[in-house]
Amino acid sequence: MPLFVNIQKQLTSYPLKIAFDLDQNTLGILGGSGSGKSMTLRCIAGIETPDQGRIVLNDRVLFDSKRGINVPIRDRRVGFVFQNYALFPHLTVAQNIVYGLQHLKRTDQRSRLAEQIEKLHLQGLEDRYPQQISGGQQQRVALARALAIEPEILILDEPFSALDTYLRSHLQEQLAEALATYSGTTLFVTHNLEEVYGICQKILVISDGKQMAYDRKEAIFDRPETYTVAQITGCKNFSQAHQISATRIEAREWGCQLDVVEPIPDDFACVGIRAHHLTFSDDANQMNTFPCWVTKTRETPHRTTIYLKLNSPPLHPMDYHVQAEVFKERWAMVKDQPLPWFVHLDPLRLFMMRSHDVGGG
Ligand SMILES: Nc1ncnc2c1ncn2[C@@H]1O[C@H](COP(=O)(O)OP(=O)(O)OP(=O)(O)O)[C@@H](O)[C@H]1O
């Protein structure tokens, strides 16, 4: 197992308790602001020391509180990229990239430099200083510097948050390309769900220092088991619910009953569906289909969010049950049709969650 982590640390507002085994994969870490993501990375890197536990990287014990082992940062072979670049301003791009390679011979330094320059498309920038290149280029240099030491573990803490959307997607592609030839383990913290889904295979969800979920990304996004995990992964529609029969539930806040196909968990408490999974139907008799009225809409450049009240017209702008998200083209087709419309909650898209732990996330 390349990375084994089982640590505890008392933080100012809660105890951090994280435990996972990671195989040769890229792990995405999701969680609200202040939930303990960076602290987890800092403990793995050796910047912070856990109160107790054990961290093992490729069979090398980095930390073991019982045995008094705490390998210093410089010997952990960790590469870092942070949001605010942290390049050395007085060193050129080339000098920044070889910074961690002083123990190597000049010729080896030069070949590592050439490799990273090519991999991250930095040709022609070698002699510039950080302030003479753009934010996106600086972040590519930071990535090149982190990879040049051939780290066993690469830590990316919100590496693209300071960049605009265009640069961000461009860098995402370059990161995916660089990771394809990197054989170590990558830990990636981001608030951007598309980024985490595009780059990582596994996802760890943290809330107030607690590990809420750890699984393959498909499982986390398709079948979040708790309200907190569903919410952190972007779900907007929830209702408290209870079981009526083996295949039917009542969604109390939505005022409707729903047929379900997945097994209903024992301590079932809440049902959810992602906004882009709601569809409009012409067939009012289809399963899980309800008349609905539009309370309000909100536009983004490519999509429209439609706030819907099920079964009766809304009384005020906050009177809605669910949000549906559709592309602009679809919106243009439906928007002038007479109300009520019929909204379909596909049983395959409904997820049934264990506890309605509102406030726990
Ligand atoms: N050295 C420390 N000792 C104790 N508590 C700390 C220490 N550093 C940070 N904290 C606390 O630990 C908690 C988690 O902080 P952390 O930076 O890991 O959050 P985060 O999930 O990375 O948040 P964000 O997404 O906002 O960066 C915060 O409540 C913070 O105040």
Image (spheres, helix red, strand yellow):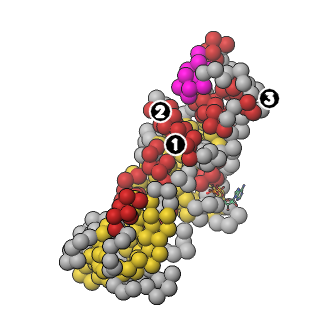
Reading the image, the residue beneath label 2 is: 177
Q: Position of residue 115 (x, y in %)?
A: 55, 20
- Structural crowding at the residue carrying mark 1, measured as other residues with C-alpha within 10 Å and reported as few (<14), some (14–19) or many (≥20): some
343 or 84: nearer the viewer: 343
Q: How many marks?
A: 3
Instruction: State whether label 3 is within 8 Å of ligand 1.
Output: no
Percent across and percent down for residue 77 are 60, 33
Mark 1 or mark 3: which is in front?
A: 1
Q: Earlier in the sequence, mark 1 or mark 3?
A: 3
The kind of residue on which mark 1 rests is Ser
* Quarter of the rendering containing residue 25: top left
Q: Quadrant of residue 55?
A: top right
120 within the magenta span = yes
Question: In the image, what residue type sits under mark 2?
Answer: Glu
The magenta span reads 111-122
Q: Which mark is residue 169?
A: 1
> Would residue 19 be visible to someone looking at this image?
no
Closer to the chain start, of discs 1 and 2, is 1
